Image (cartoon, coloured by chain):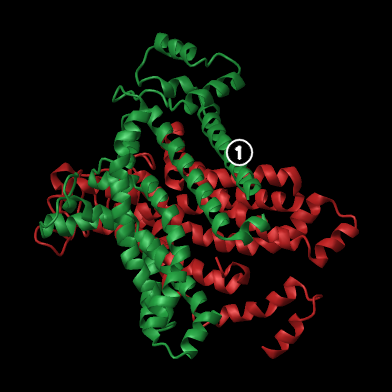
Chain colours: A green, B red
Amino acid sequence: MTRFIARRIGYSLVSLFLLSLTIFLFVRVTGDPAVLLVEPGASQADLDAIREQFGLDQPIWVQYVSFIASLAHGDFGQSFYYRTPVFELYLTRLPNSLMLALAAMAFSLLIGIPSGILAAVRVGGFWDKAGKIFALLGLSVPSFWIGLVLILFFSVYLQWLPSSGSGTPLHLLMPAFALGWYFAAAHMRLTRSSMLEVLGSEYIKLARLKGLPEALVIGKHAFKNALIPVLTLAGINLVIMINVAVVVETVFAWPGIGRLLYEGITFRDFPVVQGVVIMGGTMIVVVNLVIDVLYAVIDPRIRLEA
Amino acid sequence: MTMRSEAVSSEVITAQAIREPSRFEFMRLADFPLVPVLILVGFAVIAIFASVLAPHDPEVGKLVARFRPPAWQHGGSMEYLLGTDHLGRDVLSRLMFGARISLVVGFTAVIVAGAIGTVLGIVSGYLGGWVDQVIMRITDTWLALPALTFAIFLAAIVGPSEMNIVIILGAVYWTRYARVIRGEVLSLKEREFVRLAIVAGLSKSKIMTRHILPNVINSAIVLGTLMLGVVIVTEAALSFLGIGVPPPKPAWGLMLSDGKRGLMVGYWWLTVLPGSCIVLMVLSANLLGDWLRVKLDPQLRQL
């Protein structure tokens, strides 16, 4: 057990190392990093000052070590636009992103789980077919366009909901729908396949043989076990939602991390862009680690296999 | 059908022989996705002949004719069938040239990503050892980065242009191919024909190009078709954010971004039309990809 966890942590550390190396090398290979790290329109003297300050005249491995050292201290550099440390900016935006992601998650589970169960209970029936179309639409309709169309209907024509900003629960409705849309389809498909697997198992056959009413078999016995993989995926997806909300947050002017990334692009604020990418990758590596370890704790077969 | 199931029981049968009858099935399939294919072909025809079909210049507008609604609405005219945008540019002409951008960027990006991913997947799976370790660790790490965020990061470094978008999308999406192809190579490696090739003294590079590659190319094509939709949406998102195709080019994502200027006053055609085009194209690509997956490549069915 301890060996499994130690190995899994080592594996994640390698991932984090490669992640930082990727980011570090991309910035340096594709051009002069000083140009990216200095404010737009800076003079030659400023460029030289930046080169010295960041040690860009030193050997590349020395630069990498200092890059890693500052990351480890939570130092992602200063934002040119806000004049504050990037990490602080990130932390102030994180609660908003989390709120949006949680609302989108609630929505995607409320739609995805019941429709997935309906599809599994009547395979090939109306709900199954409707579910397939729904899943396909979820994959094919871009979230930012959903957002724009929602604004057009609910803010411009009907004038029911505010088109942008934050503060009230009403502000949260449309962005949560736009962001949760794609994930609702993913959760539906997984609920369907997981439910089908459980419904084919021995203990469900036994429950039916005992003469339990079908509603009880599905609602109580099958539902609980079928939900485990769905909730695991939901856990990973919550972190992914925080990191892919950039277009939805831009459409609705929602002040989260995605919006921060967008501002980073439009104001040519490179430290912000870099910081958001590194944090996003790190979060996903960590969540994958946590889930793998939890699974190993729950299910001994996994740790014996590895 | 019964004949085939008997034949399959023997291991000697080659992949080629199994695939042979499916070529005929290919032609007479009832569930061939006709409508999606027609839509894609339609977009392709429009994209190729855009300069002949388009009634106006897509990049130059008349400021006096700003925000004209489509012809059937009050205030619209036959001159601008689908209305005009904030610079008086004809929406229909822009949509037509936009199809060209989406298809060209989409296809080239899928091919770039597919080429990188397939080569690395084959090398990684066949050679194994430390080469495999290095390639797969990089693949895992890049997969951990959210695709859109990673693309934005790269776009922020290299700056916007159509060429750069293709490179960025290739760099972001090759990992999806590498993973799947490597898995297939691992099982192909154990098959008789590869072992015989080794015994026959063929070099590793010859085995990889002549024996492994032809057997994974189907999967690469299926994955490519499925990736086409993803890539087109990502390009639209990057253009929408202002770091994709640079203005005044008529990329659909860029049109949506411009359309925001008229959104709050209800100029729906600037938002609904480009978005519908994206949805139609992506939906068709996904339907075709789904069908190809089931027909061409049974190994990918569970994907």
In this view of the protein, which residue sits in the foreground, A130 or B171? Answer: A130
Disc 1 crowd, CA 10 A, few/some/many (<14, 14-19, 20+): some
Residue under mark 1: which chain is it in?
A: A
- In this rendering, would B42 be left or right of A63? left
- In this rendering, would B152 be left or right of B30? left
Against A209, residue B17 (above or below) is above
Res. A94 image quadrant: top left
- Horizontal and vertical percent for residue A69? 52, 23
- Horizontal and vertical percent for residue B47? 40, 57
In this view of the protein, which residue sits in the foreground, B201 or A280? Answer: A280
Could you tell me which secondary element the residue under label 1 belongs to? helix
Q: Quadrant of the N terminus of chain B?
A: bottom right
Residue closest to the far right: B200
In this view of the protein, which residue sits in the foreground, B160 or A206? Answer: A206
In this view of the protein, which residue sits in the foreground, A76 or B285? Answer: A76
- Horizontal and vertical percent for residue A52? 49, 11
- In this rendering, would B236 be left or right of A25? left
Against A225, residue B256 (above or below) is above
Res. B182 image quadrant: bottom right
Question: Which residue corresponds to the image point at 36% horizontal and 52% vertical from the top-left?
Answer: B97
Count of numbered marks? 1
Q: Quadrant of the C terminus of chain B?
A: bottom right
Residue B261 shows in the view = yes
- Horizontal and vertical percent for residue A98? 32, 46
Against B26, residue A275 (above or below) is above
Question: Which residue corresponds to the image point at 17% horizontal and 45% vertical from the top-left?
Answer: A167
Mark 1 residue type: Val
Residue B92 shows in the view = no
Question: Which residue corresponds to the image point at 58% horizontal and 36% vertical from the top-left?
Answer: A18
- Badge 1 is on which residue? A14
